[in-house]
Image (cartoon, rainbow, N blue to C red):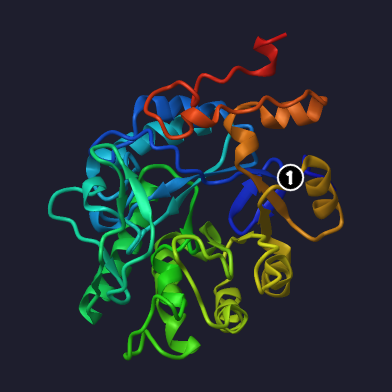
Amino acid sequence: MDLFTPVTLGALSLRNRIVMAPMTRSRCGADATPTEVMVDYYRQRASAGLIISEGIAPSADGLGYCRTPGIYSAAQVEAWRAVTDAVHAAGGVMVAQIMHVGRVGNVLNKPVGSETVAPSAIRARGDMYTDQQGMQPFDEPRELTLDEIAAVIEDYRTATANAFAAGFDGVELHGTSGYLPAQFLSTGTNQRTDQYGGSAENRVRFVLEVLNAMASVEGAGRVGMRICPDNPFNDLHDEDPQHTFDCLLPQVKALDLAYLHVIRFPKGRVDNIALGQRYMGDRLIGNESYTFDEAQQAVAGGELAAVSFGRNFIANPDLVERWQQGIALSTFDLATLYTPGAAGYSNYPRASNTQ
């Protein structure tokens, strides 16, 4: 067994265990609708066993960064269908990562009439880029009411239904990086006194209700979740992340999801990979700076079912073929990671075009 061996994760059949990790690349139009250049980008990388899309907002309130996509309008669904059709035509499998940023947003990056909301009205320390005024501080969020929490959960369900209507093979809940699900999980961002706050049992409620809503559409076998316990990104802090995730993950395991996507974080207080193995070891996708050899060993030894790669896929649309044939990898241009257009995005050549 190695990275090139097929694997089944829930209802998803992967032709290899090399997963393209979700990466924000900021190539959408102003209305959060995918563009034609995104069709080319994802199609070029369809030899991955699984493509996990960049984070896609389930609502206008869920947007936070400039030029990032949504899946809450008919136009967005239609545009995503062009992407999934292209990936499927190339033999690929693709899931949509549903990402609500919560308090991690700025009004300049959001549609008129949308809001920045969170479990509690606590502004994140830090800044984010806007096309209009450069770096700007995060918005001060408004605390969600109980009725609004129910509406947000319904947004996730609708986004999941829209993802399947757009041709995605599955969906992934983005549960880390300081975004809304992580905000509910963490004591530093969740200071509610109702059934969604206080104890770990209460703080995990939102995530579980979202996962159940997503699974209600086409079954849990087409739903995954991404986590990184103790990740401080976007000013996130939890007093006891080990306890929080020991409360969450047994209930996630009972849902029988397709996979758990875990970012390792050696600087944290939790061994994230060991945590994932404890609860979903046979459906675990590992992430974060794995070398090819290290990933091969993790899969061969049964530590991981698959490994996701982000940076390696940026400049190597034919990453799978390069590793199969022992061809050196190209390096990406840091300056064009988030700039509009094809440059540094869909114009990286395949090895066969450079020899």
Q: Is residue 316 left or right of residue 24?
A: right
If the image is split into quadrants, where does the C terminus sit? top right
Query: Please, is residue 204 above or below residue 115 in the view?
Result: below
Other residues around mark 1 within 10 Å, as few (<14) / some (14–19) / many (≥20): some
Residue 176: x, y in percent? 50, 63
Residue ID for mark 1: 6
Q: Is residue 49 left or right of residue 162?
A: right
Residue at image coords 26%, 46%: 109
Amino acid type of the residue tagged 1 in the rendering: Pro
Foreground: 33 or 267?
Answer: 267
Residue at image coords 81%, 48%: 294
Residue at image coords 60%, 42%: 310
Foreground: 152 or 7?
Answer: 152
Q: Is residue 140 left or right of residue 238?
A: left
Circle 1 SS class: loop
Foreground: 45 or 8?
Answer: 45
Query: Please, is residue 114 above or below residue 169 in the view?
Result: below
Res 92 quadrant in image = top right
Query: Please, is residue 315 above or below residue 138 in the view?
Result: above
Res 39 quadrant in image = top left
Residue 148: x, y in percent? 22, 73
Q: Report the number of numbered marks.
A: 1
Residue at image coords 38%, 63%: 125
Residue 31: x, y in percent? 23, 39
Foreground: 132 or 203?
Answer: 132
Residue 17: x, y in percent? 71, 45
